[in-house]
Image (spheres, grey):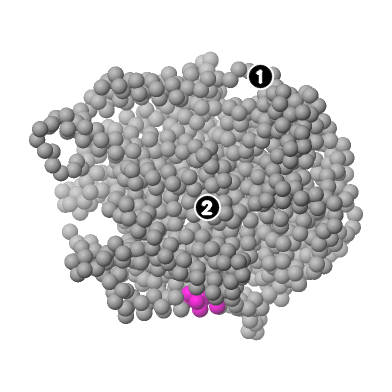
Amino acid sequence: MDTLIQQIVSGLATGGIYGSVALALVMIYQATDVVNYAQGEMAMFSTYLAWSLLNAGLPYWVAFFATLAIAFVGGLLLERIIIRPVENAPVLTIVIVCIGLLVIFNSVAGWIYSYIQKPFPSPFPSKPIQVGNIYFGAHDLGALGVTLLVLAGLYVFFRFTTLGLAMRAAAQNPVSSRLCGIRVGWMLGVGWGLAALVGAVAGMMVAPIVFLDPNMMAGILIYAFASATLGGFTSPGGAVLGGLIVGVIENLVGTYVKFIGTELKLTVALALILIVLLVRPSGLFGRVTVHRV
Amino acid sequence: MRKGLLLTLMAALGLAVTLGPAAAQTPGVTATEIKVGNTNPYSGPASAYGTIGKALGAYFKKVNDEGGVNGRKINYITYDDSYSPPKAVEMIRKLVEQDEVAVLFQTLGTPTNTAIHKYVNAQKVPHLFVATGATKWNDPKNFPWTMGFQPNYQTEGRIYAAYILKNFPDAKIGILYQNDDYGKDYRKGLHDGLGEAAKKMIVLEQTYEVTDPTIDSQIVNLKNSGANVFFNVTIPKFAVQAIKKAHDTGWKPAHFLNNVSSSLATVLKPAGLEASRGLITALYLKEITDPQWKNDKGYQDWVAWMKKYYPEGALDDQFNAYGYTVAQAMTQVLKQCGNDLSRENILKQAQNLKNVEFPLLLPGIKINTSPTDHAPIEQEQLAKFDGERWVLFGEIYDASKK
Amino acid sequence: MPPRAWTLGLAAVALAVALVLPFTLTNFRLFQFSQVFIYAIALLGLNILTGFNGQISLGHGAFYAVGAYTTAIMIDQWSVPYGWTIPTAGLVCLVAGFLFGIPALRLEGLYLALATFALALAVPQILKYFEHWTGGSQGIVLSKPRAPWGLTITPDQWLYFLCLAVLVLLFVLAANLLRGRTGRAIIAIRDNAIAAQSMGVNTALYKSLTFGVSAAYTGVAGALSAVTIAYVAPDSFDVFRSITFLVGVVIGGLASISGAIFGALFIQFVPNWAQDISKAAPWAIYGVFLIGFMYAMPRGIAGSLRLAAVRWYRRRAEPAASAGGSPR
């Protein structure tokens, strides 16, 4: 019984990581209709920038918020300068540009910071919290809390602010939005900026656990995709919840389904994607789109 | 228009044509230089190892600055193979057929080296000091041109097994290993070393992939299996997690950590020095972040070299110490060649290292090779972490004597 | 549109050049060009699915792996001559692709991309799991074949000709397929599936078949790669392989048969050039190349060439009158 509960707790902890990255993915998709494959690398790069700031002596929370600001501006500029020229190109062209960004960020990070892993500090205490025989990592809980805070912030932003409304309009119907005076191009830029910001938060929450190195997001990105698929690409809350579910399922299957064991954990996550896509492509909480002829 | 097209095509053809090279007696060697070829993963999932390739180049620069080897400078050519076997095949063929190197040195990775194994032996190119701990490189009968370097993983596993049999007769062993040949090789070594006792002693085995974000789940399972001995075959990133999680959940087994993750600065410190107390590993190199070597001349020379020739390299990265030492071995071989730098003689001299010591090898550990012994380093010593440094204990295990 | 005679003429010239090259290039270069041919076959497969039929696949590396391992296992375990393994690999992948295509019918765009992405990611783990057949992470080592029938050419020259022959055969087959009724149905499904269906096209059957054919092509490429590299291991078939194929198809030009060759040349040689330019951050240079190509040629190399040819032809045909509009 203890094993079960501990595995669930561990699963929720890992799931929190997946959920936060999935949130960033869903954010960009919602705002710009593009799946940005470079999302993970952008988050990693932002985390390295945070590391540089911390190394320069800034206290944690100053560096944290400074990184968020830099990430936001960076994301905005990326969209306006790099993505804009191909905005109207076929979807796959944009995908290739995103892949180009992916390799550039990865390569430049490796070049500047080298490939050896670096420890990244956590703002939360490192001693675990013990409840009976179950151990909760303080950082895991803290990171999950931060993710939920970000989620709440996004919800408020999109629901109750004019800018949020304008962004939603621009994503749903660019033509009509322009007629209303909304500067659609800049809305896309803000969308990317926000997604970069969320990604930076995810990166800084994840790095203390998986250690900072240029390839740190590679494995997580896969699970983030699984989470976003499960929760629904059109639902930020669903993405986070999807992450938690993926984390728990992955752990339980690895522990209790013997013939799969730990050797096919990744395959389990992927089988999950496939099943969800077949049964309910829009995910648990996503909106189902109907194609009209 | 058609003429223009034809002209363009001919130009393209002309550009594509590379004239075949004239056959050379001593490929890669001139009166002033020796070409040494290498491939390393400078990108992709294994890019953390790429620093070795850079360290090698930095060492050869030092050798060249000091006059080179027998009056010749070392021309070190290295290509990126991204840890991909097809890419490795292409780059090695480039080194052998286009750059015509004299020797292939420290090519990294088991799958990548497996892909080129047959080829380099068929081409009769010395394939020296490959950077992998797999056992198959010590096979001079079938692959006379290939030679390993470090003590292989199976040997290390056997060393731990011998120690467990002697000191923990009632052991209940839990193993965590990476799901590839590195992990499986270590596991095999432990199994083979335990022999009959393996079935009784090993209570749970867990694997992980390099792409997994955490291994917390595996540690939980291992703890709950009741294991009191933990064989930890993980790379640094996961070793830290394993040590930390074991400590945090109150699990205190006899903890054997594989050599690959024995770095103080990269693994033990982030995991927590207190949490790491009691860890046992097998070493053959001085661990360069271990304070006991601070005043050691070998260490200080290494630091001076790093600062001058590889300033962008990390001073707490054990790979840079490894690269330094292997490069010294290569230089030694070239020195022994004198003026005969044919591929045959380079191999001959590589097979002729007798009790060679290098400054960063642990005291007592020597390099020995012969035409039937293609494993240069076969000795390791156990060390236990006392919260501050790796305390060497016991005798030096010598696998060649088994 | 430029007359078909031109396209055929250019193809004939290209073929002539390709036949002459083996006697002027070094073995190493021939090896590289064999890889180009292999990639071109794989890319054509992917292009049939993605470019002509509109189904995005980020997982063709999986079929490449299946083809390669089919060949490797047949040679290693049952000593089948490698010549037979190549069509067998194609057949196996045809079936596999068709079977995958059936559930894929329900998915579109982003979701299909995700499903195929998941497939590509699962492949290395699955290959390692079935150790007994696949050799696990150690992989399977094969022997490089020599030229048959006593031909006095080097193994590299022989493999070059083999790959070239398979390439020409498959390209001709694809061209025939795509120019005929089947091709029109496939393209119609891409452009407007609902309209196609109401016109009587059995979209489900065609989409699954296209998946199968596409997988078969990539499987044959995989088989050839196993023969030329003489080694298969899970590390050769990671997710980056699938992404590289997609890159090759888009850069080469979607919905274009010649695009497969351009794309293959790109993915084979540009990473090497990037390394020559910058040892420190070669992939950053590669990324810059990718973005630059997409800016300059959003429809790929073949697409841009086609555009340029059409513009030039139109300008020659109607010098006085304004052509109006942009060519589509």
> Measuring 52% from the left and 66% from the top, which residue is drawn there?
A203
In this rendered view, identify the residue nearer to me: B160 or B279.
B279
Q: Find disc 2 in the rendering and name its residue.
A: A108
Residue B24: mark: 1
| C142 left or right of B32 in image | left
In this rendering, position of residue B313 left or right of residue A256: right
- In front: B215, or B298? B298
Residue B217 as seen in the image, left or right of residue C163? right
The percent position of residue B398, horizontal first and vertical second, equals: 86, 47
At horizontal 52% and vertical 52% (from top left) the residue drawn is: A108
Image quadrant assignment for residue B394: bottom right
Q: Position of residue B143 (x, y in %)?
A: 71, 32
Question: Quadrant location of residue C76?
Answer: top right
Residue B200 appears in view: no
Q: In terms of depth relative to the viewer, which is nearer, A148 or A84? A: A84
Q: Position of residue B245 (x, y in %)?
A: 67, 71
Left or right position of C123 against B345 = left
Q: Is residue C323 above or below residue C146?
A: below
Label 1: few (<14), some (14–19) or many (≥20) C-alpha neighbours in 10 Å = few
Amino acid at circle 1? Ala
Q: Main secondary structure of the magenta part?
A: helix
Tally the numbered discs.
2
Q: Which residues are magenta?
A: A142-148
Residue situated furthest left in the rendering: C321
